[in-house]
Amino acid sequence: MNYQEKSIKNWAEDDRPREKLSLKGERALSDSELLAIIMGSGSREESAVELAKRILNSVDNNWNNLSRLSIKDLCKFKGIGEAKAISIITALEIGRRKAIQELPEKPKITRSRDIFQVMQSIIGDLNVEEFWVLFLNQGNFVVKKELIGRGGISYVAVDVRIIMKIALEEYATGIILAHNHPSGNLNPSRDDYRLTEKIKTAARTLDIELLDHLILNQKSYFSFADEGRL
């Protein structure tokens, strides 16, 4: 089979990802078809959909795993150059930022699992540490979530004064800390314990309660509150 035969342009109209999306909507497309649209084209040996399938298979067909690949990682696939790699990374970052902004209903936090559901899509699959704070009102509804610090693979600097300033501006009565461990290890470090205690002490002076501190990865989390560490 030559390249011309494998080209998406020669497929039945219903099988072409763009036309399929136009006719049936985005929900009708498979993951590989969506990725093929992002890439725009395949290579001389395979169509965009076939290339997309190969890439997704390499990450267990998991978008979170795909988002962890760098430009260099993606360019190792034959048919992926820097431009296509950048397009893939950009699309996945848009999805991540969309998840960050999805708080129209002000979720209520009643347990650690609620925190994980709010934060997992935001920081669970990052390759570097990010430290976030959820600010809650008296009803335990999240009124604001804020990125406080971004660091390297194993450390992030956090300014406690910024946390307290935002808490006062939002009239928060409770705060929840959350950060990720890119290594996947959920055990708190000594620095995690020290920082938690420092923030708890500062919050107490302002009659603000530190409700929990979550360390999370893609699939699970460690809760200071659940483990009696607050």
Image (cartoon, rainbow, N blue to C red):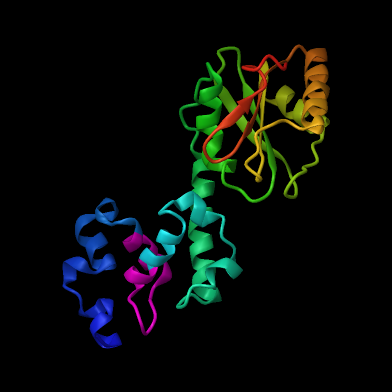
Magenta stretch contains residue 211? no
Magenta residues, dominant SS class: helix
Can residue 26 be seen here? The reply is yes
Quarter of the picture containing the C terminus is top right
Residue 136 as seen in the image, left or right of residue 107: right
Up-down relation of residue 199 to residue 207 (above or below): below
Estimate the x, y position of residue 58 in percent, counting from the top left.
Answer: 45, 61
Up-down relation of residue 18 to residue 157 (above or below): below
Up-down relation of residue 42 to residue 105 (above or below): below
Estimate the x, y position of residue 97 in percent, counting from the top left.
Answer: 54, 48
Q: Residue at x 51, y 52 (%)?
A: 65
Magenta stretch contains residue 39? yes
Q: Residue at x 58, y 31 (%)?
A: 221
Which image quadrant for residue 11? Answer: bottom left
Q: Which residues are magenta?
A: 32-51
Quarter of the picture containing the N terminus is bottom left
Estimate the x, y position of residue 91 in percent, counting from the top left.
Answer: 48, 59
Estimate the x, y position of residue 213 in percent, counting from the top left.
Answer: 67, 25
Given residues 41 and 61, the one toward you in this image is: 61
Q: Residue at x 52, y 24 (%)?
A: 113
Residue 150 as seen in the image, left or right of residue 16: right
Given residues 78 and 159, the one toward you in this image is: 78
Given residues 122 and 153, the one toward you in this image is: 153
| Count of numbered labels shown in the rendering | 0
Residue 198 as seen in the image, left or right of residue 16: right
Up-down relation of residue 77 to residue 199 (above or below): below
Residue 182 as seen in the image, left or right of residue 42: right
Which image quadrant for residue 43? Answer: bottom left
Can residue 172 be seen here? The reply is no
